[in-house]
Amino acid sequence: MSLRRSGQTSRLQVDDLVMELTTRKVSRAGQELHLSPICWALLEHLMRASPEPVPRERLESKIWGDEPPDSNTLKVHMHRLRKTVDKPFGRPLIHTLAGVGIQVKAHA
């Protein structure tokens, strides 16, 4: 299933992952997920771009602006995001494409 937008982009959805932008709630398979502000922002950018991959540099720029983080900061936050969004559900939606970027995409 691809990205769905409802109304004025108040809801993003990829497969069973739903992000309500107005209420700042995220759920997967009907289960509410709790994200840090940085993980929320990362997921929002990835879901808006879905199914296209987002290059690491673009994610860092969107989240941290002109002050790039330490080399491993994005990796740490992506690990936390995957731990919350993917690990409990057994079917990953967050994918890393080596040399390309990170994407949120449902399996066909």
Image (spheres, rainbow, N blue to C red):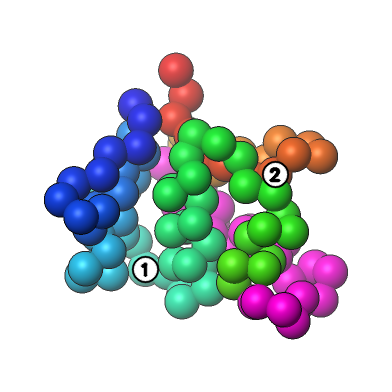
Sequence-wise first label, 2 or 1: 1
Identity of the residue furthest to the left in this view: 7
Task: Choose between 64 and 96: the one closer to the eye.
Answer: 64
Total marks shown come to 2
The reply, left or right, for residue 42 in relation to residue 66 is: left
The percent position of residue 73, horizontal first and vertical second, equals 73, 71
| Pointer 2 residue | 101
Magenta stretch contains residue 79: yes
Residue 106: image location, x then y, percent: 44, 30
Q: Which quadrant: the N terminus?
A: top left
Mark 2 surroundings within 10 Å by alpha-carbon count, few (fewer than 14), some (14 through 19), many (20 or more): some
Residue at image x 43%, y 49%?
48
Span colored in magenta: 64-89
Q: Residue at x 26, y 53 (%)?
A: 9
Residue 93 seen by the camera: no
Residue 47 relative to residue 72: left or right? left
Element assignment for label 1: loop
The verdict on residue 86 being magenta is: yes
Q: Is residue 40 left or right of residue 101?
A: left
| Residue 8 seen by the camera | yes
The dot on residue 51 is none
The quarter in which the C terminus is drawn is top left
Q: Position of residue 5 (x, y in %)?
A: 25, 44
Q: Residue at x 47, y 40 (%)?
A: 50
Q: Mark 1: which amino acid?
A: His
Q: Is residue 11 above or below residue 97?
A: below
Vertical position of residue 55 compared to residue 100: above or below: below
Q: Which residue is mark 1?
A: 34
Residue 33 found in image quarter: bottom left
Relative to the observer, which residue lies in front, 91 or 63?
A: 63
Name the quadrant containing residue 25: bottom left
Question: Mark 2 to mark 1: distance in Å?
Answer: 24 Å
